[in-house]
Image (cartoon, coloured by chain):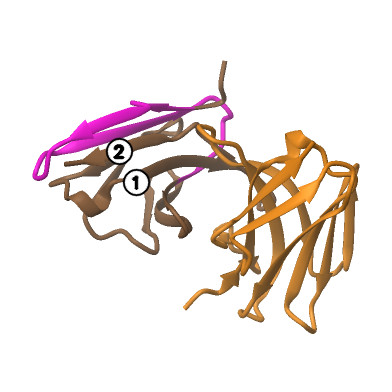
Chain colours: A orange, B brown
Amino acid sequence: DQQVKQNSPSLSVQEGRISILNCDYTNSMFDYFLWYKKYPAEGPTFLISISSIKDKNEDGRFTVFLNKSAKHLSLHIVPSQPGDSAVYFCAASAGGSYIPTFGRGTSLIVHP
Amino acid sequence: DADVTQTPRNRITKTGKRIMLECSQTKGHDRMYWYRQDPGLGLRLIYYSFDVKDINKGEISDGYSVSRQAQAKFSLSLESAIPNQTALYFCATSERRDTQYFGPGTRLTVL
C-alpha cells in the first residue's frame, strides 16, 4: 500500500507558466516532507522541504504548500523553465526517522 | 569531485552470478542508504546504515546484503543475481533529516 502517492505520472507545461505537482499521503505520522528532482543519468537532488508546523515554504521559483487536514502537498514552480524538465519525487518521513518514503515520481516537461 | 560516488556505473551480468555495487562518500555523513529505482515505482529502500556498526533492512532487502566497511563506504551485494533485480541502484548519504545526497546511480542488467 502506497503511503506517498503521486497520481500524475507526467505533466506538460509551457515555458513561463506555472507548474503544479501534487502529492498525497496516508500516514498521519508523517511530519516532514521533501521534494527531489532527478535528471536522466543522474541521482536525485534535494529541492525543497517543509515541516508539518508550516503550511508553506518558498525558495526562489519553488514553493511547497502543505495541507495537513487533506494530507496533501503540492510543489509550485513559477515561472517554469525548460531546465526544470525532470522527474520530481515527493518524500515524507515520520517523527525522528531519517528514512523517507518516496512517491513514484512525476515527469515534468516544460516546452519552450 | 563528486561527494557520493558509485562503481560501476553500468553492469551487465548473468543469472546466478554474485555482484557487488560500491558506494563511497566524502561528505563525512554517518548515515548511508541503498535504493532501487524501477520504472513507475519510484525509489524503494533496500538497506540503510546509521553508523559503521549499524545495518538495517529496508522495504525490499530480500536477495540483497550489505557491508559497511568504513564510515565512507557502503557496499551492496547480490549473492545470486536474478533478472527481476535489473534496475537502477542509488546510494545516498545524510547527516540531518532534511536532505539526502544521492550518488549518480548504477544501472544493473541481469540476463
Between residues A96 and A2, which one lies in front from this camera angle? Answer: A2
> Which residue lies at the image location 39% right of the left edge and 64% below the top edge?
B59
Between residues A72 and B60, which one lies in front from this camera angle? Answer: A72
Range covered by the magenta-colored residues = B5-33
Q: Is residue A84 above or below residue A63?
A: above
Whole-number angstrom distance, CA of label 2 to CA of label 1: 6 Å
Evaluate whether label 2 is on the same chain as label 1: yes
Subunit bearing disc 1: B
The three-letter amino acid code for the residue at tag 1 is: Ala
B13 falls in the magenta region: yes
Q: Quadrant of the C terminus of chain B?
A: top left
Relative side of B70 to A22, left or right: left
The residue wearing badge 2 is: B108
The residue wearing badge 1 is: B87
Mark 2 vs 1, N-terminal side:
1
**Quarter occupied by residue B67:** top left
The three-letter amino acid code for the residue at tag 2 is: Leu
Q: Residue furthest top?
A: B1
Percent x, y of residue B96: 66, 47
Percent x, y of residue A69: 80, 84
Q: Quadrant of the N terminus of chain B?
A: top right
- Secondary structure under badge 2? strand
Does the CB distance between marks 2 and 1 fall below 8 Å?
A: yes
**Quarter occupied by residue A109:** top right
> Which residue lies at the image location 29% right of the left edge and 45% below the top edge?
B66
